[in-house]
Image (cartoon, rainbow, N blue to C red):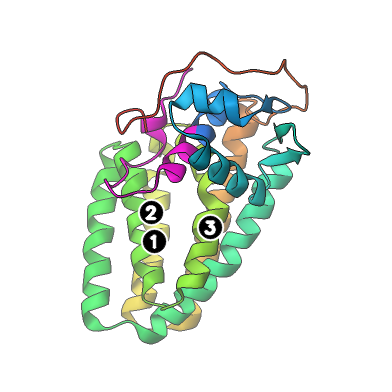
Amino acid sequence: MRVSSKSLASIPPLNEPVYLRVKRAIVADLVSGEFLPGMHLTIDTLTTRYGVSHMPIREALRQLEGEGILISLAHRGFKIESVTEDYIRNIYDIRVGIESLLAHRAAELATDEDISDIRHLHENLSALIRSGGGVPAALENVKFHKRIYAIARNPEAELILEGRTRVVRSVGDGFGGYTPDVFEIVIAEHEKMVVALERKDPKAAGDAVFDHVTAARDRLLAKMAETHRFTSDAAPQTGTQPSRGITDQTL
């Protein structure tokens, strides 16, 4: 099933750098199957595909190489790596470590206003999940987590999270969001996080996030296994589909 880039990420702000929009488009094309593991990508073909200049293409490719999705081929472009079970597990190991630490610190520093705001976000998110909100619920979930972690005042850690989780997040979004069988499970996991913050209990907050992120990993791995979405290493022919441009609507 073809999944559009728009369904995989929020509509970008008007001042978002073009290279981030290109990066989102490449990830969406990988997740949807337009790009396959082993495929050879060049700056020229991507420039034609997305209708942008070489500079944002280069920066997007450089970042994706740093995230382990692409391998640089000396003077010959890049090769797409496989999104394997090991890759998913490794990224979640990074997530669980950093997010647990940030939640622990957030419980130490949160003001009453912070906690009230998070409770409100949790209630909105819970309503969206129960309504089968799909992508809107996934976007609200990111907002909820970011609001908690911002309290920890560690932008460097948040930057690592953003860079290292974009691909995995896009893979998860490709399944269409939360399914009814996990609605109440996810809401209960979030509730534990909020209660720990309300009690200003750092250990409980860190533990709640650890449990939630670990469970999210297991849910994603199970979905990928059930639908045979782990990519193989078979290399297709070099090239891409015809250009479709890069716009706010497609991203």
Residue type of the residue flagged with mark 2: Val
> Which callout, 1 or 3, points at the residue further toward the start of the chain?
1
In space, the residues marked 1 and 3 are separated at their CA atoms by 11 Å
Image: magenta residue range? 1-25
Mark on residue 248? none
Left or right position of 84 against 156: right
Q: Image point 33% across, 59% down: which residue?
A: 144
Q: Nearer the viewer, mark 2 or mark 3?
A: 2
Magenta stretch: includes residue 20: yes
Separation of residues labelled 1 and 2 (CA atoms): 5 Å
117 left or right of 220?
left
Under mark 1, the amino acid is His
Closer-to-camera residue (140/44): 44
Which of the two discs, 2 and 3, labels the residue nearer the N terminus? 2
Contact between labelled residues 2 and 1, with CB atoms less than 8 Å apart: yes
Whether residue 71 is in magenta: the answer is: no
- Return the x and y of residue 25 as percentages of the image width and height: 47, 33
Query: What amino acid is at disc 3?
Result: Val
Residue at 72% x, 17% y: name it: 236
Q: Are marks 1 and 3 in contact (CB under 8 Å)?
A: no
Give the numbered dot on residue 145: 1
Quadrant containing the C terminus is top left
Q: Does residue 234 appear in this view?
A: yes
Q: Residue at x 77, y 28 (%)?
A: 233
SS at circle 2: helix
Which disc number belongs to residue 142? 2
